[in-house]
Amino acid sequence: MFIDHARIFVKAGDGGSGHVSFRREKFVPLGGPSGGDGGNGGHIIFEASNSMSTLLDLRYLRHYKAKSGECGQKSNRYGLAGADVIISVPVGTLIKAEETGEILADLIAHGQSAVIAEGGKGGKGNARFATSTNQAPREFQPGTLGAECWLTLELKLLADVGLIGFPNAGKSTLISAISSAHPEIGNYPFTTLRPHLGVVEWTEHSSFVVADIPGLIEGAHEGKGLGIQFLKHIQRTALLLYLIDITEWIEENPITTFETLRNELHAFDPMLLERPFAIAATKTDTQGEGHHLQALQAYCATHQYACFPLSAITREGLPALLTYLGPAVLENKGSCISNS
Ligand SMILES: Nc1nc2c(ncn2[C@@H]2O[C@H](COP(=O)(O)OP(=O)(O)OP(=O)(O)O)[C@@H](O)[C@H]2O)c(=O)[nH]1
Ligand SMILES: [Mg+2]
């Protein structure tokens, strides 16, 4: 199951208390203070991992607590520090404090980690309070408390190109044709129920990542179809690719389709309309006389939109699309990361 939102409670370990004791040694009647310091509490640390693709695990386990530090001991022995708790999350996870909405971390690379709740500090034992004038101090410090809070976690996949289209437009077929991803393909709407990422090797040394998300329909922003919830996964892409089916017998006018898609994007996040994009006219092998394609091409020419007629089945037009996408991704990469 693909889960891209979770709410969890974290509590870092408390610091252990400092100890109060005095040396008791044979033949040393007035032993000095010997209470050791308490150990530090464990942190709550988040780490991004490529081997995770969903926040599902965090839906089941919602409370995380790191171990407290042990108290200091006699003979100047320190208390043991509490072990950290490391929570693995998929790359692209945003961690926010639930109460304030503040972004505490945005883990965008495999292995990247962040301490989200700091463990408490161990307190000082009485040995640390000895001075020339006070050689038998009874003071000590209790440990400080570990931080605790509710967090909201949001997974926003990291891809370079986001595929946008009506159900059945051919998004999954295209990603299967150009990358190693193999989402289900079906001749019925809403075959794809969760986002899929595919890596496209467009030259020997360079690649980019494409995101296939569930199809949009008119009114998606009001919850129609699968709604617009999946659009968050294309919010961080450098480019959008609108897929418009130009099959001869399809009823919708391709220009209306394109404008409907844009309206839905606008309703979700107006900034998405500023994102560089291209249009793929899909299923050229079923275009017949090509009247939809001609209308779309004329519209694109007027607006100076890049338009790529293609068939993911016969592979016609795919090299031209990749030759455009590769450099365009490089040019726009990093310019549109949005965290909100
Ligand atoms: N003839 C032809 N059929 C295609 C082409 N691309 C996709 N199809 C067919 O169109 C149907 C829908 O394809 P999908 O790739 O599942 O469409 P989608 O956009 O992912 O659809 P959803 O996941 O429902 O949003 C399938 O029956 C595909 O075989 C193409 O280039 N030519
Ligand atoms: Mg699909």
Image: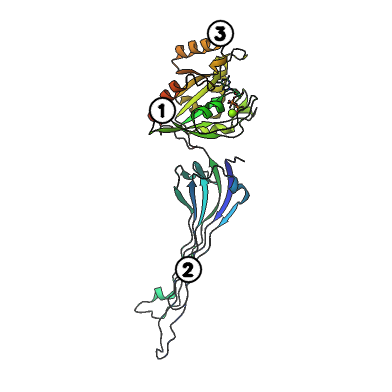
Mark seen at residue 145: none
Numbered disc in front, either 3 or 1: 3
Q: Residue at x 40, y 82 (%)?
A: 32
Tell me if residue 51 can be seen.
yes
Where in the figure is residue 225, as x and y percent of width and height? Answer: 65, 28
Q: 10 Å neighbourhood of mark 3: few (<14), some, or many (≥20)?
A: few
Q: Earlier in the sequence, mark 3 or mark 1?
A: 3
Q: Nearer the viewer, residue 314 or 81?
A: 314
Q: Residue at x 49, y 50 (%)?
A: 46
Q: Quadrant of ligand 2?
A: top right
Q: CA distance from mark 3 to mark 1?
A: 31 Å
Respond yes or no on whether mark 3 lies under 8 Å from ligand 1: no
Q: Which residue is mark 3?
A: 289
Q: Nearer the viewer, residue 140 or 284?
A: 284
Q: Is residue 194 above or below residue 117?
A: above
Q: Quadrant of the N terminus?
A: top right
Q: Nearer the viewer, residue 165 or 188?
A: 188
Q: Nearer the viewer, residue 116 or 278?
A: 278
**Residue placed furthest toward the bottom:** 27
Q: CA distance from mark 2 to mark 1?
A: 53 Å
Tell me if residue 246 can be seen.
no
Q: Which residue is mark 1?
A: 326
Q: Is residue 5 above or below residue 321?
A: below
**Residue placed furthest toward the front:** 314
Q: 10 Å neighbourhood of mark 1: few (<14), some, or many (≥20)?
A: some
Does dot 2 land on a helix, a strand or a loop? loop
Numbered disc in front, either 2 or 1: 1
Does dot 1 land on a helix, a strand or a loop? helix
Q: Amino acid at mark 1?
A: Gly
Q: Amino acid at mark 2?
A: Leu
Total numbered badges shown on the rendered structure:
3
Q: Which residue is mark 2?
A: 80
